[in-house]
Image (tube, rainbow, N blue to C red):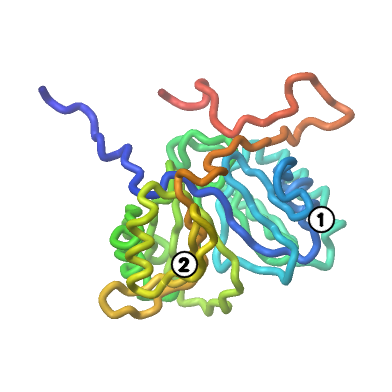
Amino acid sequence: MPQPFDRSAEDLGNAIHFEHVNVQVPDQRLATRFYVTGLGLTRDPYLMVTNMWINAGRSQFHLPSGRPQVLRGHIGLVIAGREALLARLASVAKKLEGTAFAFAERNDHVEATCPWGNRLRCYEPDAARFGRIALGIPYVEFDVPVGCAAGICAFYPEVMGMPADLRNGDGKVAAVKTGRDQHLLFRETDRPNSDYDGHHVQMYITDFSGPYRKLLARGLISREDNQYQYRFCDIVDLDSGKHLFIVEHEVRSATHPMFMRPMVNRNPAINNRNYAYGHDEAAWAMGPDQYEG
């Protein structure tokens, strides 16, 4: 019987979900104005309420209090309603004067910068490009030195069991699959990079012990958190051991108690003046009328 389907197109590899980006913020009040009022996202009502977790579909921004941290690159955010987003960002501009806050319209996205310099690219939902999400974090992109992408592309499949491919465009890019329609992107640039300040990313994997043993054998485990979680920071050349890039990875098992826990996402269009029953919550996934099945 002829095979009509490309079954490999549905392979995820070892990583099954990218959950959060963690950057410290020194002022939760300003963070609320940017992430909640400006972007229209939702402060998690259940966990870390004295800290700060911000829901974006099934993913999150973790914003613990501390010295500000800035990701070396940018974060992709899918959020519907470009005009409403621009209006919300404009509404917080005055209250964020004197910070690094900025926003601008681009051809296919809105670029927004948080009060401490973290950059986000906000896109309209696009099933062909980002999968069937109406709200979420489809990728995190890091700026890496020229000559590192090929080594990074080799590291993740061999050590972490996460598929990766090398792309060319605006600089060479190692694209690492971290979940369904989710990626870590490592784009080569000759621009100077700032020193690593401790920010981290987190993903869930199915083969939890295999990568652990490989990382441990290379002396790359940086922290033993608990039964369900460990961390590593250094991405290295597999042959020479040369350091390629550093960013902390919080690696969780699929048996972690918080794996795929439900997250509340509010509808930012609803307020006390236009309230309508049944419209409080925003759907993170596209409806059947928004994509071709």
- The location of residue 196, given as percent across then percent down, is 56, 75
Q: Residue furthest right?
A: 273
- What residue lies at 80% left-to-right and 21% top-to-bottom? 276
Q: Residue furthest front?
A: 227
Where is 260 relative to 289, above or below?
below
Q: Residues within 10 Å of mark 2 (few under 14, many from 20)?
A: many
- What residue lies at 39% left-to-right and 56% top-to-bottom? 176
Q: Tell me if I can see residue 227 in this picture.
A: yes
- The location of residue 104, given as percent across then percent down, is 68, 55
| Mark 1 secondary-structure assignment | loop
Question: In which quarter of the view is residue 24 placed?
Answer: bottom right
| Mark 2 secondary-structure assignment | strand
The circle on residue 93 is 1
- The residue tagged 2 is 232
Front residue of 252 and 268 = 252
Of badges 1 and 2, nearer the viewer stands 2
Where is 5 relative to 110, above or below?
above
Question: In which quarter of the view is residue 171 placed?
Answer: bottom left
Query: In which quadrant of the rendered image does the N terminus lie?
Result: top left
- The location of residue 237, given as percent across then percent down, is 32, 74
Q: Residues within 10 Å of mark 1 (few under 14, many from 20)?
A: some
- What residue lies at 75% left-to-right and 55% top-to-bottom? 51
Query: Contact (CB < 8 A) between labels 1 and 2?
Result: no
- What residue lies at 43% left-to-right and 24% top-to-bottom? 292
